[in-house]
Image (cartoon, rainbow, N blue to C red):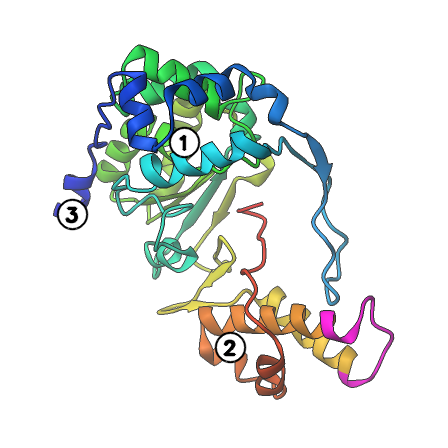
């Protein structure tokens, strides 16, 4: 563990000791906070959704995901809480997901050149984190008083769990997992294993990384977090190593081969003027965004696409594509 990681390993306390102090920090009245907290559940509009199918995607979208979807005044308050209380937290370097200025490249770089990569997925992470655990996150991990922790818990949980789709949920999940994974970090240090998290995805690399699997599963289970056994992946020396939408090459981060194949297929389909699933403009935007994403990962990987310049000129910026690990 580097000196920087050692310094950042201790969670900085917020030390908000009264509802009035909380209201002052957030720039809101305490009456408004209490009113919204008392009616918090009424601001949610739950629904199920599937990812939209991209024009060059071979496989259909995966099964529907449940979104709790806060709206109105509650969502506005959650955004303020996230911006003023959670995002300023100095997370250690191994926490990569939902941290400002960190990306999938930061996550991948921690494991570049490793002989073996192991990834573990926490099953239904947000629904598995209870309101009681979030209360203790605010009170114990972040140093808020009991009254403040109770008020913040009402504002950031729904039906006794961490809500999917709330602006505060990714950061709170990060703090919660960070507050319980000390034994995992210590065991990784003992075994010489590199460790990182991307919210609910845990990655381990090194010659002895297989040895951490059962230890991590047991530790997570002690905090009522289950692991998707079917999503435990062990990528040995000869295996392709995939991590949060990237491919780990020998000495650099690459784009996954299946992503390059889908983009190449999409280009071919367009050049042959085959029927498109949507308008030409939408097709170009989506395809161009995928190509720009590949270029951000590894410029060399996009040079094989002869039409890249034309697509890039026509295609405005879009968020990177969702990956299995981040969905």
User: Real-space Cα distance between discs 3 and 1?
Assistant: 22 Å
Residue 301 marker: 2
- The verdict on residue 240 being magenta is no
Q: Position of residue 36 (x, y in %)?
A: 51, 21
Against 46, residue 160 (above or below) is above
Which is in the foreground here, disc 2 or disc 3?
Answer: 3
First reached walking from the N terminus: tag 1 or tag 2: 1
Q: Which residues are magenta?
A: 271-282
Q: Position of residue 82 (x, y in %)?
A: 40, 37
- Furthest-left residue in this view: 3
Quarter of the rendering occupied by the N terminus: top left
User: Real-space Cα distance between discs 2 and 3?
Assistant: 33 Å
Q: Residues within 10 Å of mark 2 (few under 14, many from 20)?
A: some
Secondary structure of the residue carrying numbered label 1:
helix
Camera-side residue of 243 and 233 = 243
Q: Position of residue 241 (x, y in %)?
A: 48, 57
Q: Position of residue 227 (x, y in %)?
A: 52, 30
Q: Is residue 2 visible?
A: no
- The verdict on residue 281 being magenta is yes
Provide the residue designation for mark 1. Answer: 172
Q: Residue at x 27, y 35 (%)?
A: 185
Residue 290, quarter of the rendered image: bottom right
Provide the residue designation for mark 3. Answer: 4
Secondary structure of the residue carrying numbered label 3:
helix
User: Real-space Cα distance between discs 1 and 2?
Assistant: 35 Å
Camera-side residue of 160 and 112 = 160
- Furthest-top residue in this view: 146
Camera-side residue of 311 and 220 = 311
Which is in the foreground here, disc 1 or disc 2?
Answer: 1
Residue 65 marker: none
């Amino acid at each position: 563990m580097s000196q920087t990681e050692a310094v950042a390993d201790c969670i900085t306390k917020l030390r908000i000791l009264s509802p009035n102090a909380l209201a002052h920090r957030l720039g809101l009245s305490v009456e408004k906070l209490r009113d919204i907290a008392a009616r918090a559940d009424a601001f949610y509009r739950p629904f199920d959704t599937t990812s939209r199918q991209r024009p060059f995607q071979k496989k259909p979208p995966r099964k529907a995901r449940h979104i709790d979807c806060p709206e109105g005044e509650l969502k506005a308050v959650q955004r303020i809480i996230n911006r003023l209380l959670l995002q300023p937290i100095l997370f250690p370097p191994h926490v990569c997901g939902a941290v400002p200025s960190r990306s999938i490249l930061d996550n991948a770089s921690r494991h570049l050149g490793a002989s073996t990569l192991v990834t573990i997925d926490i099953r239904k992470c947000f629904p598995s984190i209870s309101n009681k655990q979030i209360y203790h996150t605010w009170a114990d991990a972040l140093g808020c008083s009991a009254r403040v922790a109770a008020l913040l818990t009402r504002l950031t949980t729904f039906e006794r769990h961490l809500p999917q789709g709330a602006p505060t949920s990714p950061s709170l999940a990060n703090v919660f997992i960070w507050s319980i994974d000390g034994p995992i970090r210590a065991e990784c240090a003992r075994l010489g294993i590199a460790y990182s998290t991307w919210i609910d995805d845990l990655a381990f690399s090194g010659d002895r990384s297989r040895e951490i699997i059962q230890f991590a599963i047991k530790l997570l289970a002690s905090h009522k977090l289950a692991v998707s056994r079917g999503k435990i992946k062990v990528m040995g020396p000869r295996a392709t190593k995939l991590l949060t939408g990237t491919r780990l090459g020998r000495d650099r981060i690459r784009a996954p081969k299946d992503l390059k194949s889908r983009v190449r297929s999409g280009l071919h389909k367009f050049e042959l003027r085959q029927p498109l699933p949507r308008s030409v403009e939408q097709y170009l935007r989506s395809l161009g965004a995928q190509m720009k994403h590949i270029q951000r990962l590894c410029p060399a990987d996009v040079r094989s696409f002869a039409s890249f310049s034309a697509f890039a000129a026509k295609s405005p910026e879009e968020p990177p594509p969702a990956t299995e690990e981040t969905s």
